[in-house]
Amino acid sequence: MSILLIIALILSVFLAVNIGANNSAASMATSYGAGVRSKKQAVILIAIFSLLGAVLAGAPVVQTVGKGIVPSTILANNVGLVFIIILIAIVFISWANIVKVPIATTHAIVCAIVGIGLFTGSLNSEKFFQILIWWIVGPVALFTINFLIAKYYYFKIIHYLAINFSEKRVNLILKILITISGVFLAFSGGANNSANAVGPIVGLGLIESFPGAIVAGVAMGVGAILFGGRVLETVGKEITEICLIRAISVEFTGAIVILAASIYGIPVSIAEIITSGIVGFSCAQHGFSKTASNKHVVRIAFFWFVIPFVAVGLSYFLSVLYFKYNISAIF
């Protein structure tokens, strides 16, 4: 194995660690915000079930990111393009971790690949449009479902539990449900996010989809344990107050959408989907105007909308330089 391939593998692992700190950590922000789990408990559970999700269900999305958006031959014949993808993603995700914002990791990775596909004329437009549809429908669905639950069913659920169960029994039921929903979400997140880190090196032919998913799962777990607490604080505490019922709702609905996307091999953003559910609750509780003026919501929205365009443009520009100045000869 050449030194360049080793560097590509190391960068992918570093990227997976950052993803674990950002997106995977956000997967349990709701239950942390509800006060059920400490940061330590949350990130340990994230690490375990992210790995399981990556190993058991991560291969289809890895295949899409590595070979479905642009042909694998494009990356395999141009190692430098893989470095462009990974470095763009690392820059954005590291920046997001520093400022404690749950960035849409998938947007940075996929759009970096899209930029290369546009330049080389090899973009699989049909697959990319499928991904775009999921990017739009997923967050909208989570926002809408959780807004409606908070607005019209939240107090009905509380009333039902209060008249049918003792307080002690209610607390036990909710704690069991929040544990199940949390690990379900971490599992779904591991299945989907593993592709973000290792997809490019799978396209390079450096590693196959299944072992790539395992490598990503381990690295994501390490990232969640070492650095995940910072993003947990932002999403779990600084957007809106989150009680157990709301946390369960966001986690279960989010996990279902993310796992469905994983089964179909579609890379989606966990941070975007889960945060959309939390924002839905905030709008129902505090109103749209107050939620929209929340500085954390504004900053998160900025990252979501700006990064895809910047990633595509930067990737395209770097691809131009790569071929125009024959940088490929170095690689």
Image: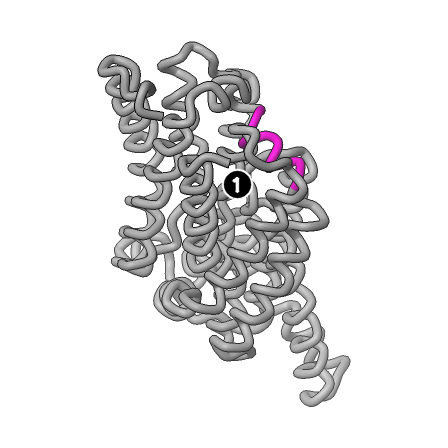
Q: Inspect the magenta stretch and tell me whether residue 118 lies in it.
A: no
The location of residue 283, given as percent across then percent down, is: 41, 56
The location of residue 331, given as percent across then percent down, is: 36, 26
Determine whether 63 is above or below 28 in the image: above
Q: What residue is shown at x 60% (from left), y 69% (from top)? A: 45
Q: What residue is shown at x 54% (from left), y 28% (from top)? A: 203
- The answer, for residue 35, to whether it is visible in the render is yes
Task: Label the magenta part by its dominant secondary structure.
Answer: helix
Instruction: Indicate left or right for 322 with 251 as reference.
Output: left
Q: 34 or 25, which is in the foreground?
A: 25
Q: Which residues are magenta?
A: 59-67
- The answer, for residue 268, to whether it is visible in the render is no
> Coloring scheme of the render?
one colour
Name, please, the residue furthest toward the right.
164
Name, please, the residue furthest toward the top.
121
Task: Name the amino acid, label 1.
Answer: Val
User: Could you tell me which secondary element the residue under label 1 belongs to?
Assistant: helix
Q: Which residue is mark 1?
A: 198
Q: 13 or 66, which is in the foreground?
A: 13
Q: Residues within 10 Å of mark 1 (few under 14, many from 20)?
A: many
Q: What residue is shown at x 39% (from left), y 63% (from top)? A: 231
Q: Inspect the magenta stretch and tell me whether residue 61 lies in it.
A: yes
Determine whether 51 is above or below 318 in the image: below
The location of residue 127, given as percent across then percent down, is: 56, 22
Instruction: Give the image quarter of residue 97.
Output: bottom left
Q: What residue is shown at x 64% (from left), y 34% (from top)? A: 265
Q: How many marks do you count on the picture? A: 1
The location of residue 53, given as percent across then percent down, is: 66, 53
